[in-house]
Image: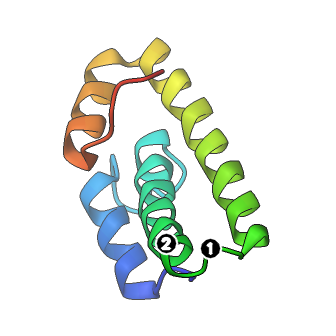
Amino acid sequence: MALGLEQKTEIIKSFARKDGDTGSPEVQIAIFTTRINELTDHLKTNKKDHASRLGLLKLVGKRRRLMRYLKKSKKETYNKTISALSIRDNV
C-alpha cells in the first residue's frame, strides 16, 4: 500500500521546484494522488476494508486543501499540476 522509494523519488524529481524539494504543494499533491489511486484500486477488490476507506477519505481531504491553497497562490502552477496528474478542477 505504501509507495516504494523508487516511485516516490520519480514523483519528486518530476514535480520538484529545485533539488531536494519535497515539501512544495505540487510534490505533495502528486504523492497524494498516487497514493489515492493505489488505495482506490485496493478498495475495488477489498470492499469491506473500512479502515483503508477512512484513510482514503483523509488523503482526499488533504489533497483538496493543498489544491485550494495552490489555486489561490499560484494559478499557473496549479493548472500545470492538475493537467499533468489528470485531476478534475473541482476546488
| Residue 44 in the image: above or below residue 5 | above
How many numbered marks does the figure carry? 2
| Quadrant holding the N terminus | bottom right
Instruction: Mark 1 and mark 2 in contact? Answer it, CB < 8 Å.
Output: yes
**Three-letter code, disc 2:** Lys
Query: Residue 2: where, in percent of width, then height?
Result: 57, 81
| Residue 66 in the image: above or below residue 1 | above
Single out the residue that lies furthest toward the top: 72
Query: Residue 23: where, in percent of width, then height?
Result: 54, 51
Q: Which of these two is toward me, 87 or 81?
A: 87
Residue at the image position 46 percent from the left and 86 percent from the top:
4
| Residue marked by disc 1 | 47
**Three-letter code, disc 1:** Lys
| Residue 73 in the image: above or below residue 42 | above
Q: Which of these two is toward me, 17 or 69?
A: 69
Rate crowding at label 1 as few (under 14), some (14 to 19) or many (20 or more) other CA atoms within 10 Å.
few
